[in-house]
Amino acid sequence: MPLIAAEGLRLDMDAGDYGVLAVYFIVVLGIGFAARRSVASSLDFFLSGRSLPAWVTGLAFISANLGAIELLGMAANGAQYGLPTLHYYWIGAIPAMVFLGLVMMPFYYGSKVRSVPEYLRLRFNKPTHLFNALTFAFASVLIAGVNLFALALIMQALLGWSLAVSIVVAAFIVLAYTTLGGLTAAVYNEVLQFWVIVLFLVPLTVVGLVKVGGWDGLTQQVRDSDLGNAALNAWEGTSVGSSTSAFGNWIAIAFGLGFVLSFGYWTTNFAEVQRALSAKNMNAARLTPIIGAYPKMLIPFVIIVPGLIASQIIPGLGGEGDLQYNNAVPLMVNDLLPNGVLGIALTGLLAAFMAGMAANVSSFNTVVTYDIIEPYVKRGMSDEWYLRMGRIVTVAGVLVAIGTAFIASGYQNIMDYIQLLFSFFNAPLFATFIIALFWARATPWAGLAGLVAGTLGAAAAHYGHEWEIVNLGTAQAAAFWGAGVAFVADAVVTVAVSLVTRPKPREQLRGLVWSETPEELRRPRRERGDHGWYRSPAVLGSGVLATTLALNFAFG
Amino acid sequence: MASADTKTAAREDPDVRDELIRAAEDAEAEHGGIRNLFDLRTIIGGLFIVYGAYLTIRGILDSQAAIDQAAGVRINLWTGLAALAIGGAFLAWALLRPLTLDEIVEGQAASLDEEQAHDALREEREKAARRPRH
């Protein structure tokens, strides 16, 4: 996120607004202290003792993704492109979330693995596991740092705080509650954050809509503006061969965004899956991403729509400095919200930044402790030792993130590179998982070879485009292509290497591969306590898919 | 063969180490602090009641300038009332269906049969890993 000039965005906060913020900080820290009493073992700390109800893990699942960078970025997309941004939510998230809950969760939760890399250890071998654990740990601590830096930038612009003060204060609060209360504190705060964000985005959207004369007034104005009709129809201009949409044609959208990128992110990113692994039983674990899918389906109406409104009521939006698209939401807040709700808005933004960072930190410490230190560095220590180590790793991770944030402050583009790096490792992972789950013949070494090949494929596509060896269209379309190349490279190499190396004995794959798992465990029954259609993953999953489809027709 | 020996053999297998997971679970079963878990619903409810009361009072006292800024909407008042309603709903939910130890334990035991089936699969994996490799 490029620098925001200080003056034009400065909010006129009064004592009451700061009071709202202070109360929130106190509650967040209080949750950390209270959750500490529930931490007596490493599983308590890293996975909340697998005890949380589905509504909590489901909202945390969506909140872990609803960081401030996502929020500001999607509003910016809404201002720049309009309703086609909906693809990121409806095509780019809902199907993958339902798939995770219905098909993959029985294997993640059933095998009792404590992390996503741990599944790779059981299914493949040590090198595959270590490669994935190291890349994940590396990327998440860097992204936590970038979150911190972005937070500091926005604090500087909105409140005039110095970068260093914002970075240290925010890092300290996140550090305090994640170290004390572990995942429980992180998850509880994510749920709280979700409601505070809703309490800020809904009033912003309502006031914005009143200002432009309601939905009809908005569509009228957009149609008459430079954005035109394309900004009001998600699927316009996406036919193959004559695509005029910034997202490319419908094949690129469906395969690149809808399949590879979205399934890679939602089904294999441990920062997400960890929330489901902390659920109290199999049914709650399967419901986690499906319950999260409902708010994910609806939240663009209070993120993209304000962006679109901003494009109409803020003259010159999309220009340089203060007026860049990324500032659409802060500019709207500044313009429309009076003292009172203003404090809620700032609190919601800050909460989103901190929760995004806490999600990275709480998955980072789990992977470093369970997937790097326990198996490869210090085996056979007591559980108390690993619990203590988890807390030390949390502190170390936050300190590294602070360092990254200060480095990032020197390089405006570093965030793009880190996101890119993450996509190198994330996009191929889904290919590996889908083959691992459904093809018992896939061999241990094919796991490693496939992941490495996928990462190299993503890098090749990216630098091929960057150095103008091949032309992949807009940066957006190039990202979709890169993900597609990574996926195909991973799949081809995994299959090829499998054919020439020795597979694991079938008995070792029991419960890890579809064909080696009894029918009743692939489709777990629901038992007492999970009765009622409203607790059925299949019913709720179909419901959200059908509603999303209907919404696509309504806004297509 | 003594059981200690088989354990060592399984641990030395490079790929399959379910017993790392098992050790963590045993420790959790022994020390699990999760019985001390507090109810998140009362915290969300409490915070929203506080925010709601503050915004509602502020909304009643709002100056014309504040109302004009928000396109003529008494946004503090409406947001405050909405926050009170959400907070009240969470508190009512927590009061009507309190979180009991029974609920945590019952919830975790709900799929006992499945649990046993998964444990059996895990046994099979570990047994397969213990077999001498050729």
Image (cartoon, rainbow, N blue to C red):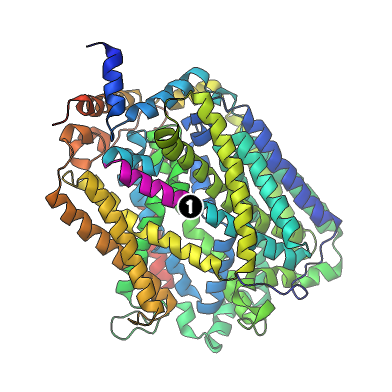
Residue A441 horizontal/vertical position (percent)? 15, 45
Residue A321 horizontal/vertical position (percent)? 67, 79
Classify 10 Å Cα crowding around label 1: few (below 14), some (14-19), many (20 and above): some
Residue carrying label 1: A138
Please report, as a chain letter, where disc 1 is located: A
The residue most toward the front is A377
Q: Residue at x 57, y 72 (%)?
A: A76
Does the magenta segment cover residue A125?
Answer: yes
Horizontal side of A471 relative to A141 (left or right) equals left
Residue A361 horizontal/vertical position (percent)? 55, 46
Horizontal side of A179 relative to A12 (left or right) equals left
The amino acid type found where label 1 is placed reads: Phe
In the picture shown, does residue A550 fall above or below B117? below
In the picture shown, does residue A491 fall above or below A232? above
In the picture shown, does residue B108 fall above or below A71? above
Placement of the C terminus of chain A among the 4 image quadrants: bottom left
Q: Residue at x 68, y 68 (%)?
A: A330
Q: Considering the whole magenta stretch, tell me its main secondary structure.
A: helix
